[in-house]
Structure formats: structure tokens, C-alpha cells
Amino acid sequence: MGSLLEKAAPSKAYNTSVAISGSSGEIAKYRKIHLFDARVGDKIIGESETMTAGQRLQKITVGEFKAGLSICYDLRFPDLYQSYARQGATVLTVPSCFTRQTGTAHWESLLRARAIENLCYVLAPGQVGEDTRGMEAYGHSAIVNTWGEIIACGSLDKEEIVYGEISLEAVKEARRKLPGIVLKWDKVCLSVLK
């Protein structure tokens, strides 16, 4: 489930994604790390005014898959997803409320990039509708495979469930075709730090 408001400091909240097991209750909680402070058209969005940033990555195991959790604006920060991939993630989740303007320009490109550079599936439910400020959400929930292909996509303005088949073998095959791509991020980071 994501994202939900979770009480933080006296007048702020965390933007939180919660993974729940049907049989055992809550299994993981991720608090959005990168807050959306931006100007979109003539509107200013300042999440940091009402939200507190999370501090930790959160991975879960779902069946045979390891999933790295994130939320919306996190999608613009590739190092977050590279960290998940180095930790063995095979699926990346990105529940989002991209604005129509930023979604039209960047949503698909960013989802495909995160899948390709980490050789992971990306599961990205996208909110639809308009909020109280008049910001229209982009929708377009998507499932992207390890090769960056969109295997399922929702619409701009309709609530719906998007289905697609994912396979751990497909992740392994992509990583066989491009061996070391996930691990090379460590080497690049280490060489830059030296």
C-alpha cells in the first residue's frame, strides 16, 4: 500500500509505503527519502513543509522475488535503486502521484531507465484524479520488464488494476546477458571516492 501519511514530528508526516502480508500483517514500511519540492507550471509544491524525509532503504521478500520499496519522486534518484540492486532486489516498486506535466515528460523514461540500469522489474502504480490544489495526476500505472519494455500500462484518468507476468528466470537471464552491470556500480563509486 502506498503511499500513506504516517505521523512524524508534531506538525509533519512521513509519506509511507507499507507492504502487508495477507496472513501475517505488516512486513515492511518504507518512508519516502526524496521529498518533492518543485515548481510545476504556476504551482509550487513544497513537500518538505509538511513532510519529514525517511532515512532507510527497505527491502522485502515476496515469494521468490526481493523487492526494493520507494515512492514517487524517489524515481529521479538512480543511486537509490542501484543500492537495492546491489542488495539483491529483482523488483522495484514505485507507487506514485506524478503530475500530468512531469508524467508526460518523464514517467515512462524514468521507469524504463530504472529497469534497464538495474536489470529489475519495475512495478509502478500511478494515482489518477485531481487534488485540492488543482494538480492533475498522470496515472499510467505500469509494469516494466528487465529489458525496459512496458509489459502493462494503465490510463491517464481511470481507476484500474494493471496485470502482467513477471519471472525470476527473466531477471537471471538479463543478468547473464549483461553480467556484472549491477556490481559495476560499486566499482565506479569506489573509484570516484578514491
Image (cartoon, helix red, strand yellow):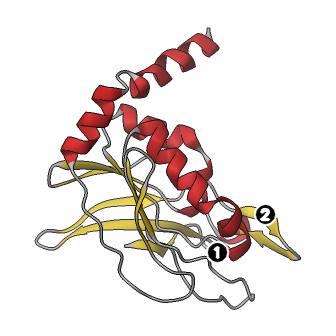
Residue beneath the point at 56% across and 41% down = 78
Measured from the top left, where is residue 167 in percent x and y?
A: 21, 51
Q: Residue furthest top?
A: 194
The vertical placement of 75 against 50, above or below, is above
Q: Residue furthest right?
A: 42
**Disc 2 crowd, CA 10 A, few/some/many (<14, 14-19, 20+):** few
Q: Amino acid at mark 1?
A: Ser
Residue position marked by numbered label 2 in the rendering: 38
Q: How many marks?
A: 2
Instruction: Kindly identify the residue that appears in the image at 34 percent across and 22 percent down.
Output: 179
Q: Which mark is residue 11?
A: 1
Which residue corresponds to the image point at 55% horizontal and 77% vertical from the top-left? 139
Residue at far left of view: 23
Please indicate whether residue 85 sits to the left or right of residue 187 in the image.
left
As helix, strand or loop, the secondary structure at mark 1 comes to loop
Is 50 placed left or right of 155 in the picture?
A: right
Disc ID at residue 63: none
Identity of the residue drawn at 13% across and 68% down? 24
- Amino acid type at circle 2 is Ala
Marks 1/2: CA distance?
21 Å
Residue 90 at x, y percent in the picture: 30, 44
